[in-house]
Image (tube, rainbow, N blue to C red):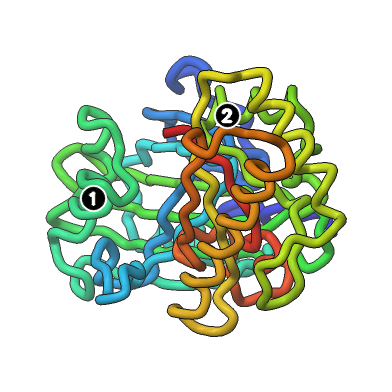
Amino acid sequence: MLLVFVALSGTVFSQGHEDDVEGAEDHPLISRFPGSVIRYYETRAADEFIIPLGEDVGEYDEDGEPIDARVVVGDITRIQYEAPEDTSTLEIYNNYESALKQAGFDILFSGDREELGWFWTRKIYLRDIIPLPGRESGLAVSEEDFRYLTAEYIDEEDELGDIYISFCTTSSGDGIGIQLDIVEIAPPDQDLIEVNVDNLERYLDEKGSVSIYDIYFDTGESELKAESEAALSEIAEFLTQNPELNLYVVGHTDSSGGYELNMELSLERAEAVMEALVEDYDIDRDRLNAKGVGFLAPVATNETEKGRSLNRRVELVKP
C-alpha cells in the first residue's frame, strides 16, 4: 500500500515557500497547512526519538521503564512552521488529525492546554524529552493555548515501515506555531545490515553502535546457534583489524516473559557472544564488556511480531 496524505484543507501538496529557511521542504508524506512558512528544519538518520503517550512523559517507574512514553529509532524529520495569523490552533489541529486518520494512522495520545497544563509543552520541547534548540523553540512552546497528538502507522505489508508522528500546534506571543516530528522506521529487510567489516566500521563511526541480527538463539535460550558463526567471524575480523578498539556487547530482548527474565536472558546472551569471541577467535577479554538491557531499549513496538523481531538483537556499542 502506498501511503499518501490527503492534502490539508483540500489544498495541493506544497513544494516550498520563498520565506522558508534555507534547505527546508515539506515531508513527502504530508502537506503543510495553507499559508504556513518553515522556520526550522532538521533531519537525522537512524536516531532515537521519545514518543509522548501521556501527561507523565519523562518519568520512570521503579523498574526504570519510561512512563507514558515509547522510545523508537528511525529516520527523523523535524519541521517547525509559522502558521497564518488568521487561523486557530483548533482549526489546524482538526486538519492534521483528519488527514492522519484518513491516511490510516491511529491516534495514540492527544491533549490540550486545559488537559495537560501550561507547563507541558515546556517539559517536552525545552527539557530532555524531545528538545528543540533554544532559539527555535518559541513557536513550539505556549503557556496560553496548545493542542498535541502522537500518531502511529503500522505497516503490515512491510513496504514503507512503521511511522510515528509527534504534532503540536500552539498560540502565543511568538505567533501560531506547528511543530511536526516524523519518525520513519525502515521495514525489517531494509533495517538489517550485512555483517561485514566495512559496515561494522561505518556504523560504529557514524552512530557509535551497530545492531546485529545475524546472531541466533533458540527462544528463551542463551546458547549460540551454529548459524551465528558467519557474523561472529566478521566481528572478530573487525576487532582484529582495530586492536585499540574496545566494545560493549549489549543483549536486547522483546517484552515477552516479563522484566526479570528478560534482563537475565539479555545479559546471558551478551556474555555468550563475548565468550565466543574470546574462546573461538582469540579476542582479548579485556576489550569486551557484556551488558543486558532486556526490553528497555526497543527500536520498534513490542505489540507486533515484526516489532518484537527487531527488538531481539545484539548491539555493539563504542564506550
Q: Amino acid at mark 1?
A: Ser
Image position of 118 (left or right of 38): left
On the image, the x and y values in percent for residue 47 come to 51, 40
Residue at 14% over, 56% down: 144
Q: Nearer the viewer, mark 1 or mark 2?
A: 2
Residue at mark 1:
171
Q: Dot 2, how many residues are within 10 Å of its Cα: few (below 14), some (14-19), or many (20+)?
A: some
- Disc on the earlier residue, 1 or 2: 1
On the image, the x and y values in percent for residue 128 come to 26, 47
Task: Identify the disc placed on residue 204.
Answer: 2
Of residues 145 and 254, the one nearer the viewer is: 254
Question: Tag 1, which secondary structure?
Answer: strand
Of residues 149 and 9, the one nearer the viewer is: 149
Q: Amino acid at mark 2?
A: Leu
Is 111 above or below relative to 189?
A: below
Is 113 above or below relative to 237?
A: below
Residue at 21% over, 32% down: 134
Image position of 60 (left or right of 233): left
Residue at 62% over, 30% down: 203
Is 28 above or below relative to 203?
A: below
Task: Identify the disc placed on residue 232.
Answer: none
Is 285 above or below relative to 269?
A: above
What quarter of the picture does the C terminus occupy? top left
